[in-house]
Image (cartoon, grey):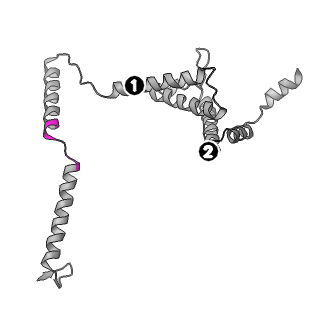
Amino acid sequence: MPNENENGKDEIVEEGQQDNAGAEVYIEEIKKLKSNSVPKETYDALIEERNKLVKSLVDGDEVDLPNDDSDTGTKNLDEEISNLRKDLLNEDSGLSNLEFWTKQLALRDKLIERDGEEADPFLPDSSQVDVTEQDKQAVERVVSTVRECIETANGDDAAFVALMTASIKDDPISKANAKRK
């Protein structure tokens, strides 16, 4: 059957091919709609909840907000922090240097995730000390160096220790003070 293409020329297209192409496009559109849709019951429940909140706002009533999963996430985070602290502070844990630093950085990440940047355990925490941007940069350098050593060691504690030792530079002031004694 003749069919006009983009250039205005007649083209012969099999009817079966045209029907299949249309069906595939139709099926793809249905898939897109389904992936971006929610069940009607869920939608209705959300609309009802919204209406209750709007009514209470207009009336000036107090409303208990719906319980979301953020509270559960905080509980899980608190539990993870607690377990990491137990592992790190247990004298009988027998952690290797690699395991210790891996857990230490994980604990640091969890504390920052839960409490924000100001909760960084590697920064000074005293009413007599103001944390400067230089302090933060120095901590980030240390953390990035330890992370690089962990990644490069690839699970080998001896390699990790060697990499850490090679990464540590002696402080010239500490050397001078040690010579005086």
Splitting the image into 4 quarters, where does residue 53 fall? Answer: top left
Q: Which mark is residue 74?
A: 1
Q: Residue furthest top?
A: 127
Residue at horizontal 58 percent and vertical 34 percent from the top: 102
The quadrant in which the N terminus is found is bottom left
Identify which amino acid the numbered label 2 is placed on: Asn
Q: Is residue 33 visible?
A: yes
Label 2 vs label 1, nearer the camera: 2
- SS category of the residue bearing label 1: helix
Q: Nearer the viewer, residue 85 or 48?
A: 85
- SS category of the residue bearing label 2: loop
Decide whether residue 119 is among the magenta residues. Answer: no
Image coordinates for residue 30, horizontal then vertical, percent = 17, 56
User: Spatial distance from mark 2 to mark 1, Cα to Cα?
Assistant: 31 Å
Image coordinates for residue 169, horizontal then vertical, percent = 75, 36
Splitting the image into 4 quarters, where does residue 120 fall? Answer: top right
The quadrant in which the C terminus is found is top right
Indicate left or right for 106 with 153 as reference. left
Q: Residue furthest left?
A: 1
N-terminal label among 2 and 1: 1
**Which contiguous range is marked in magenta?**
35-42
Residue at horizontal 13 percent and vertical 36 percent from the top: 41
Indicate left or right for 84 with 11 as reference. right
Identify which amino acid the numbered label 1 is placed on: Thr
Decide whether residue 41 is among the magenta residues. Answer: yes
